[in-house]
Amino acid sequence: MPPAIEGSTPSNSTMTEKPAKNVRGFFLYSPFSHKHFFRVYGEVDPATGHKTFTDYKVCAEDIEVTIEAGGLALYEVENGDEEKNRLDWSSKVLGPNSIGRKKDVQS
C-alpha cells in the first residue's frame, strides 16, 4: 500500500489521503440533507457496544460500484423512461406488491 499523503484543507486542519481501493463501505442516502455519503464501519467500541464508523462526503462524480448485497434488484421501465428506472430492494424483500412502488427520493 502506498504511504498516506498529508495535506491542508481550507480550514487549516490536516487531512490524510489513503487509497480507497478495496475499502468495504456502504453508499447511504440522508433524507435530512438530501445527499449521499459513504460510510465505513470499524470495530465495536467496548465502552458503548456499538460499531464505530466514519462517514465520507462523496465528491467524485463517477465511481465504479459492485453490489454485493443480496436482496437488491434493478427495476426497469419498459417504455424506456430512464428517470423511472431504479435500484431497490427486491420483491422478495419488500413483498410481491412492491414492484413499481412510488418512492420519493430527491438527489
Image (cartoon, rainbow, N blue to C red):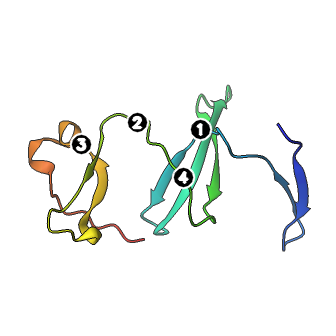
Identify the mark nearer the N-term, 3 or 4: 4
Kind of residue sitting beneath label 3: Ser
Where, by quadrant of the figure, is residue 1 drawn?
top right
The x, y position of residue 22, in whole percent, is 64, 38
Residue identified by numbered label 3:
90
Instruction: State the residue at coordinates (51%, 48%).
Output: 65
How far apart are the alpha carbons under marks 1 and 4?
13 Å
Mark 3 vs mark 4, foreground winner is 4
Identify the mark nearer the N-term, 1 or 4: 1
Identify the mark nearer the N-term, 1 or 2: 1
99 displayed left or right of 46: left
Mark 2–mark 4 contact, CB under 8 Å?
Answer: no
Mark 1–mark 4 contact, CB under 8 Å?
Answer: no
Kind of residue sitting beneath label 2: Ala
Instruction: Tell me, for residue 16, which label it has, or none.
Output: none
Residue identified by numbered label 1:
24
Identify the mark nearer the N-term, 2 or 4: 4
Mark 2 vs mark 4, foreground winner is 4
Identify the mark nearer the N-term, 2 or 3: 2
Mark 2–mark 3 contact, CB under 8 Å?
Answer: no
Kind of residue sitting beneath label 1: Arg
Question: Compared to 105, does 53 lie above or below?
Answer: above
Residue identified by numbered label 4:
64
The x, y position of residue 68, in whole percent, is 44, 36
How far apart are the alpha carbons under marks 3 and 4?
22 Å
